[in-house]
């Protein structure tokens, strides 16, 4: 792998944060791709995002106040609506007419679906409009059905129900690495017996894996297959049947794993968001149709934290060697998904720069490896 792969994709959607982290009337300051962003949810429940810097004296707007409609800077009281438009400069006297639009704050396109908030990060040198089609949505888990499941599990008001997140479980972990190493590490099929040592997941005995992969929108998909006995032990305990799994990946860093157990589904959405060149955020959201899985949330929390913690620990160790800027040697077939990721990333960047249609470089094939 060459150093010219070491860039962050722009003009695409990234995972921002779980919906339940920002209530009506709240504002949250975050960093995405090295940019300070202020997310706000207005009184009506709509989420918006703007640059978290006042254009007057550069004080973060998050240091001020948000009344559910306007953000007020703590330094001189400049006010901005939730879309970043400057609507008031208190120090101006009546005869000092001024075009306030000169002081608007940069805004970001934001979309919310299935308990997830996504933000569109443009390229300042080549901005392109946001596309609704690029927001990952998991079929079969609409707002109404998941809200109904939550309402059956506990007594809540209709207003509370309207604000409920639609995933039943979410975990967020920061990885101390550049985004590519988090993405490649999470899709790596051969590290499990060495990184994830646990009786409930897999044993240390290696066996051959043979999987069919196909190109899919902005990525690739591992075709549905039965989980082996050792890999499906945890799912068997939860669902009581033989699990089958399909795994898809799409740019910029979204992995969706759907496991069916009898007539039920368990779907994991893992989204990777670059914070800076040395820090990446990994969000693990879980959806299910099994009506009683909610009782095991404390156990699921422990297992997911352990699993992601093991990935984080090995990535942390990886940073020791990466300081010396080595050339990374990728092999076939176990590293093919990593190679596809870099090919997809380069092609997407070229298609954006050339303002042309994206052409998926992935070709369907069977991959074999031992794990």
Image (spheres, rainbow, N blue to C red):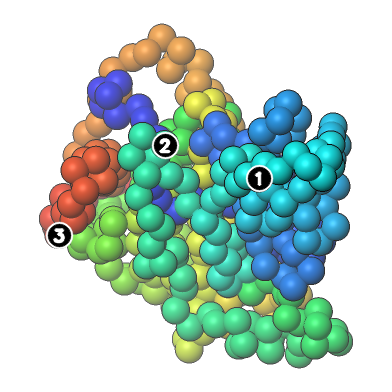
Per the rendering, the mark at residue 141 is none
Residue under the image location 24 percent in, 40 percent down: 353
Q: Nearer the viewer, residue 339 or 200?
A: 339
Quarter-wise, where is residue 102 in the image? Answer: top right
Q: What secondary structure is found at the residue carrying circle 1?
A: helix
Name the residue at 53% across, 80% down: 141
Residue 151: percent from left, percent from top: 76, 87
The x, y position of residue 81, in whole percent, is 71, 55
Cβ atoms at labels 2 and 1 below 8 Å apart: no
**Left or right position of 153 against 138:** right
**In screen coordinates, is 202 left or right of 45?**
left
Q: x and y percent of residue 291 in the render?
A: 66, 85
Q: From this viewpoint, which residue is outermost toward the top?
A: 324
The answer to whether residue 110 of the structure is visible from this angle is yes
Alpha carbons under labels 2 and 1: distance apart = 22 Å
Sequence order check, earlier mark of 2 and 1:
1
Q: Nearer the viewer, residue 253 or 214?
A: 253
Tell me the distance, in whole angstroms, between the alpha carbons under discs 1 and 3.
Answer: 54 Å
Q: Does 224 appear above or below 190?
A: below
- For numbered disc 3, what is the local secondary structure? loop
Residue 235 image offset from top left, x and y in percent: 54, 70
The tag on residue 364 is 3
Mark 2 lies on residue: 124
What distance separates the C-alpha of mark 2 from that of mark 3?
Answer: 35 Å
Residue 100's disc number: 1
The tag earlier along the polypeptide, 1 or 3, is: 1
Q: Please tell me whether mark 2 or mark 3 is closer to you in this view.
A: 2
């Amino acid at each position: 792998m060459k150093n010219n792969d070491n860039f962050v994709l722009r003009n695409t959607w990234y995972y921002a944060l779980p919906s339940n982290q920002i209530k009506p009337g709240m504002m949250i300051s975050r960093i995405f791709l090295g940019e300070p962003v202020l997310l706000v949810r207005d009184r009506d429940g709509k989420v918006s995002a703007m640059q978290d810097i006042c254009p007057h004296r550069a004080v973060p707007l998050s240091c001020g106040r948000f009344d559910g409609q306007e953000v007020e800077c703590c330094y001189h009281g400049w006010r901005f609506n939730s879309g970043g438009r400057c609507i008031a400069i208190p120090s101006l006297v009546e005869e000092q007419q001024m075009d306030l639009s000169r002081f608007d704050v940069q805004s970001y396109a934001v979309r919310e679906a299935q308990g997830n908030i996504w933000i569109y990060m443009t390229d300042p040198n080549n901005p392109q409009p946001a596309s609704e089609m690029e927001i990952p949505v998991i079929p079969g888990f609409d707002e109404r059905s998941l809200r109904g499941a939550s309402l059956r599990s506990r007594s809540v008001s209709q207003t509370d129900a309207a604000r409920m997140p639609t995933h039943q479980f979410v975990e967020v972990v920061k990885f101390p690495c550049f985004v590519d190493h988090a993405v490649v590490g999470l899709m790596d099929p051969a590290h499990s017996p060495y990184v994830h040592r646990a009786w409930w997941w897999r044993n240390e005995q290696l066996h051959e894996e043979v999987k069919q992969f196909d190109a899919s929108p902005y990525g690739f998909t591992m075709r549905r297959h039965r989980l082996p006995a050792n890999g499906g032990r945890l799912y068997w305990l939860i669902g009581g049947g033989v699990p089958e799994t399909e795994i898809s990946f799409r740019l910029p860093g979204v992995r969706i794993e759907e496991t069916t157990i009898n007539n039920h589904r368990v779907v994991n959405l893992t989204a990777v968001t670059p914070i800076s060149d040395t820090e990446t955020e990994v969000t693990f959201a879980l959806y299910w149709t099994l009506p009683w899985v909610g009782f095991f949330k404390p156990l699921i929390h422990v297992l997911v934290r352990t699993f992601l913690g093991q990935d984080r620990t090995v990535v942390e160790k990886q940073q020791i060697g990466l300081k010396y800027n080595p050339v990374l040697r990728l092999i076939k077939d176990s590293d093919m998904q990593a190679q596809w990721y870099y090919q997809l990333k380069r092609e997407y960047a070229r298609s954006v720069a050339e303002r042309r249609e994206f052409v998926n470089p992935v070709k369907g094939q069977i991959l074999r490896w031992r794990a």
